[in-house]
């Protein structure tokens, strides 16, 4: 039986064993840090994708609403889709599709990897004169 320093009677506590144990701890710390870094990177990508999707939703809804306003004022479908395109670009998105269907409009925009749809209907409003 080997004894540790000072004759303690503990097996495997010599200088070499202590170095091996320190090396094992360092390896464990490196592995834990690598796993934590990978987790944070994945979380960051997921968060960025969620933000991009929300911005694409907002751009699609705003573009559809703008087109519906143009139609509600008596504008032509081409003018309504042009307005939708301009508003999509103002939101850093790209208008992929625009269709006027009855009293409504349907648009599709793309922002980065996100592709979203929006729809709006024309609502006629009238004010009574003299009130």
Image (cartoon, rainbow, N blue to C red):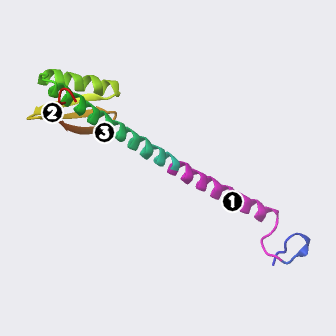
Query: Of helix, strand and loop, which one carries label 3?
Result: helix
Residue where numbered disc 3 is placed = 57
Q: Residues within 10 Å of mark 2 (few under 14, many from 20)?
A: few
Query: Which residue is disc 2 drawn over?
Result: 124
Residue at 20% across, 28% down? 69
Mark 2 vs mark 1, CA separation in Å: 72 Å
Q: Name the mark nearer the viewer: 3 or 2.
A: 2
Q: x%, y% of residue 16?
A: 78, 62
Mark 3 vs 2, N-terminal side: 3
- The residue segment tinted magenta is 10-39
Considering the numbered disc 2 on the image, is that residue within a helix, a strand or a loop? loop
Residue 46 position (above or below residue 70): below
- Main SS class of the magenta portion in the image: helix
90 and 49: which is toward the camera: 90
Image quadrant containing the N terminus:
bottom right
Q: Quadrant of residue 49?
A: top left
Q: Which mark is residue 75?
A: none
Is 26 colored magenta in this rendering?
yes
- Look at mark 1 in the image and give the residue it sits on: 25
**How far from the left and from the top, in percent, is residue 27?**
64, 56
């Amino acid at each position: 039986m080997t004894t540790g320093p000072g004759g303690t009677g503990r097996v495997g506590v010599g200088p070499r064993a202590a170095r091996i144990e320190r090396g094992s701890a360092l390896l464990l710390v490196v592995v834990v840090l690598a796993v934590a870094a990978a987790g944070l990177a994945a979380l960051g990508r997921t968060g960025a994708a969620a933000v991009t999707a929300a911005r694409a939703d907002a751009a699609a809804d705003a573009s559809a609403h703008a087109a519906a306003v143009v139609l509600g004022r008596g504008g032509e479908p081409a003018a309504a889709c042009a307005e939708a395109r301009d508003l999509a670009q103002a939101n850093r998105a790209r208008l992929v599709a625009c269709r006027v269907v009855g009293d409504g409009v349907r648009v599709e925009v793309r922002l980065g990897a996100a592709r979203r749809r929006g729809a709006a209907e024309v609502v006629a409003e009238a004010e009574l004169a003299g009130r």
